Image (spheres, helix red, strand yellow):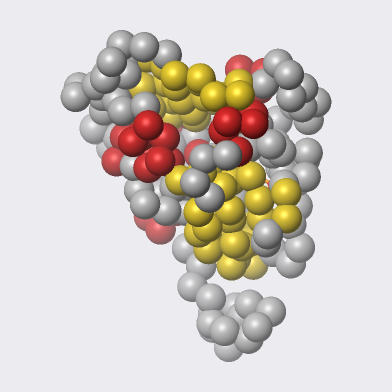
Amino acid sequence: MGQPESREGAQVQLPPGQRLQRGWPVTHYGPVPKFKPDRWEFRVFGATADGEKHCWTHEKFTALPYATVVADLHCVTKFSMVGAEWGGIAAATILDLAPPADDVTHVMVWAEYGFSSNLRLSDFASDRTIFATHKGGELLTAEHGFPVRLIVPHLYAWKGPKWVRGVEYMTADRRGFWEERGYHNVGDPWSEQRYSYQEEPGDGPEF
Ligand SMILES: Nc1nc2c(c(=O)[nH]1)N[C@H]1C(S)=C(S)[C@@H](COP(=O)(O)O)O[C@H]1N2
Ligand SMILES: [Mo]
């Protein structure tokens, strides 16, 4: 009793207020974009170290070194999916190939239809943050973010946009899509940073 168990029977530690979800629901705002390989590019822009924009075609992006991370997904609506193996390109790889300028403090991760989420550079630079192309060794499905979604294991799942198209390096913080709509600017599930009214001074920019 007490902690829920994963399918393998191992004890699973969930953040406070979360419950285990069997299966994998689809949760997002708006329609599922259609992938157009010839028009798709992954852009790193804003305050880059060299002042240039860095772009990858789908072919070039998916040819970058492949990494895997086992991580849970915590939706702020209180369900968690545990033990997924995500495969793709580590955020650290992108930071190496397209370094930010010295004064970058935050990033905005941009997705199709203008969806966005802001992260502290330190959260983005975590060695477990990954631009996932695969889950459990299989390509992501369209509903779950194909061709690329971000996974930030230590934050609520809205901090990981599906259908990612790029990263903007920022020298000051700015709120993303859900962060402008009442969700916490940082989003740590272990301290239940769900809503913006819970923010302490320093957690986020003024509205
Ligand atoms: N582009 C985009 N990505 C998004 C969202 C969204 O609304 N748009 N919602 C987030 C939320 S709230 C959650 S819980 C996860 C859900 O991922 P899933 O549908 O693969 O379970 O996607 C996140 N990524
Ligand atoms: Mo969510």
- Total marks in image: 0
Q: Is residue 33 above or below residue 120?
A: above
Quadrant into which the C terminus falls: top left
Which quadrant of the frame does ligand 1 lie within? top right
Give the image quarter of residue 39: top right
Q: Is residue 16 above or below residue 117?
A: below
Image x and y of residue 60, in percent: 58, 31
Q: Is residue 77 visible?
A: no
Residue at horizontal 52%, vertical 57%?
A: 68
Along the line of sight, the residue nearer the viewer: 54 or 165 = 54
**Residue 169 in view:** yes
Q: Against 153, is 146 above or below?
A: above
Q: Looking at the picture, how far across and down is residue 38, in whole percent?
A: 73, 19
Q: Is residue 21 left or right of residue 119?
A: right
Q: Residue 32, image x and y in percent? A: 78, 30
Left or right of 169? Residue 40 is right
Position of 105 with respect to 66 (left or right) is: left
Horizontal placement of 70 versus 49: left or right? Answer: right
Give 120 or 43, whichever is nearer the viewer. 43
Residue at image x 61%, y 24%?
A: 57
* Percent position of residue 62, x then y: 60, 38
Residue at (61, 80) in percent of width and height: 5
| Residue in view at x 43 percent, y 29 percent | 118
Q: Quadrant of the N terminus?
A: bottom right
Between residue 16 and residue 82, name the one nearer to us. 82
Residue at the extreme left: 102
What is the quadrant of residue 28 in the picture? Answer: top right
